[in-house]
Image: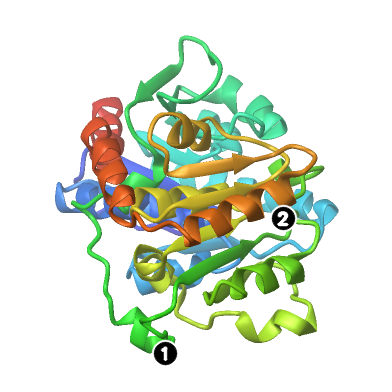
Amino acid sequence: MTFFDLTRNTVEHRIIFSIQHPAHVHLFRNAIADLTADGYEVYVFAREKDINIDLLEHYEISHTVLAGEATSLFELGLVEAAYEYRLTKAARQIRPSVMVAMGGVAISRPGVLAGAKRLIFTDTEHATLQNTLAFPFATRICIPECYQGYIGEKQLRYPGYHELAYLHPNRFDPDESILDEIDANREESLVILRLISWDAAHDIGDSGFEDVVSVVESLEKTGATVCITSEADLPDAIEDRQVSISPHRIHDLMAFADLYIGESATMATESAVLGTPAVFVSSSRRGYTDELEEKYGLVFNYSGQYRHEAGLMQALKILKSDEPNKWKRRREAMLDDKMDTTNFITKTIQEMAR
């Protein structure tokens, strides 16, 4: 049985993108649009995870869902196996030049069996299991210059971050109406607090805050408004701080916030590249958040035994600062050094497809 009618397709190069997380949608959505505009035949396959399908629909990206969401590590293995099996069948029919993914496990074997080149993007050094499974099958592995470690001859480094594929000024213009949508008091500082569920494969064994209620109470004592976005259930005492906005508008909120503090490295980086200072609290570290701290002073990383206390102290210090323009200057310095990552993604795919 054939799922894709290719008889009328005269396009020389076909590209497959695999989407398994909301972050993958953001990383690739502009490249998908650019490649399509350039005449490439682009196919997007997805596994349900959090809000990734909602984002694909919002950005009007045509896609095929191959598997549902897993609720446990055991179930994740079964769902992943089903996804790869179905992706292999689809890829053999489509016959793509290149298959693209973040992390890359899902396209590894399907790409080999379909005779396609496998292009992987990653920025997470401690995703040991994922990297072990994906890297041997990759044709090329794209990593930021700040990635800590040498992958081998397959690696291709670039001066950017994943988040600059969609938050670079060329790609994103924040909408201030988000402040009216959440009924924000313009006279108060606005803080975004992000909590994660710690159930992703690369998060197992890691941890962040010890007591989120105390974090909220301490921040609010400064007069700040705290908006929480959380993957996990919140304690009753702070449940009413959970922000309720459309998923794609969180970046507008970040752009106009005074501070980000949280357990997500991705959201810390998103805030930083938008010029909002970020406090990242997690027992693990990342090359890109380390660089954003050491070189640009836009992220403050706390991973040690007293990360909760130290991170909160830094957050309070930022809120009391009377130099708001310094974050803008630091962002401009970072942008001078970095590229529009989407341009790199698109160019790399086009070169591999030849």
Q: Position of residue 72 (x, y in %)?
A: 82, 58
Q: Is 14 placed left or right of 232 in the picture?
A: left
- The residue positioned 58% from the left and 65% from the top of the image is 193
The residue nearer to you, when weighing 301 against 81, is 301
Could one spot residue 263 in this view of the protein? no
Q: Residues within 10 Å of mark 1 (few under 14, many from 20)?
A: few
- The residue positioned 34% from the left and 26% from the top of the image is 158
Above or below: residue 226 compared with residue 89: below
- Amino acid type assigned to the residue bearing label 2 in the image: Val
Q: Secondary structure at mark 1?
A: loop
Above or below: residue 189 compared with residue 259: below
Residue 292's tag is: none
The residue pinned by badge 1 equals: 183
Q: Quadrant of the C terminus?
A: top left
The residue nearer to you, when weighing 165 against 214, is 214
The residue pinned by badge 2 equals: 79
